Image (spheres, helix red, strand yellow):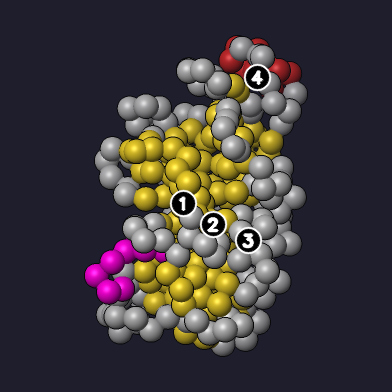
Amino acid sequence: MLQRLVLAAVLSGAGASTAVADCFPRTEGIVVEGPVWSPDTRSIAFHSGSDIYTIDVASGPVTPVANDGSWPTWSPDGTRLAYARTTGGNPPDIWVIDLANGARQQVTTWSGSDTHPDWSHDGDKIAYRSTRDDHVALYVYSFSTGLHSRLTMQEGSLPDWSPGDDQIVFERNVSPEGADILTVDYPSGVERQIFGPHSWLRYPRWHPSDRSLILIGGNETGGIPAVLFYQLPSGPLVNVVCCLEDAASPDWSTEGFRFSLADAGDLLICYMATPVSQETWGAVKARFREE
């Protein structure tokens, strides 16, 4: 039986406010990492260890896709997944698998490690993290040209294309002190820092409206994980779900009112309620007890 998790809290600090989301666990007995919505919002792909699966959002069956990879990302037409595939004990490369027939295409062949792919909305490009040439940076592969181009001059990870495919949001220098959150223009490579250095935020992802980000954060000392929205270009931060155990990898569905995330190995699907920036925490709890 699905269990409702109603979680909200007020962030301290100027410009912070509160909203609330209704979250439901969707998996049991399998550790979920890196969940991402399909373009038609019917499925979510994720990896568990080195196995990749999809799950039907409405009915719940889990379907195995591959047993040699991680960090899947959907093609815009929903027919393929790009992912980081490890073969023969070598560092991972980016591969694409056709979900209908299992046919695979290798995208990268470098000696270094290529991970965390993200497929552009126009279907032509995949951004990914690469450690080639003794440097760690974000690269972009174009299907139409067959070329790989280096987009950042420094380290970057967890890239996510903006809805207009003209920017990528990513994190840099992940450490116990936290990460920097930046955007980089495509194809110019011009970077803009949003949070940092060593912010308490991670896993930035674009909202389909192109006007805000969803992130995972705790507090200025790296406390209890929470799901936060950030209105571009300058805030505020809005706290949507708090008091999670080990939240990671949020992702919006394309219609923009549901998001998924992994929390301590569980897949949660969260539905946005009306923002409640002026309500107290006690009033929020009372309102949901009445529903």
Residue 254: x and y, percent? 71, 54
Question: In which quarter of the view is residue 195 placed?
Answer: top left
Q: Which mark is residue 185?
A: 2
Secondary structure category for the residue under label 4: loop
Residue drawn where x is 62% and y is 86% of the image: 101
Instruction: Identify the amino acid type marked 4.
Output: Ser
264 shown above or below 142: above
Q: Pointer 4: what residue?
A: 277
Q: Is residue 162 left or right of residue 33?
A: right
Quarter of the image where the C terminus is located:
top right
Q: Mark 1 and mark 3 in contact (Cβ < 8 Å)?
A: no
Is residue 281 one of those drawn in magenta?
A: no
Which of disc 4 and disc 1 is earlier in sequence? Answer: 1
Instruction: Identify the amino acid type marked 2.
Output: Asp
Mark 1, mark 4: which one is toward the viewer?
A: 1
Which of disc 2 and disc 4 is earlier in sequence? Answer: 2
Residue drawn where x is 75% and y is 50% of the image: 255
Q: Is residue 79 left or right of residue 143?
A: right
Answer yes or no: is residue 205 visible: yes
Q: CA distance from mark 3 to mark 1?
A: 15 Å
Residue drawn where x is 37% and y is 27% of the image: 220
Q: Is residue 55 left or right of residue 130?
A: right
Answer yes or no: is residue 249 visible: no
Instruction: Identify the amino acid type marked 1.
Output: Glu
Q: CA distance from mark 1 to mark 4?
A: 32 Å
Q: CA distance from mark 3 to mark 2?
A: 9 Å
Q: Which residues are magenta?
A: 132-138
Q: Pointer 3: what residue?
A: 165
Q: Nearer the viewer, residue 287 or 90?
A: 90
Q: Pointer 1: what residue?
A: 191
Q: Residues within 10 Å of mark 2 (few under 14, many from 20)?
A: some
Q: CA distance from mark 4 to mark 3?
A: 31 Å
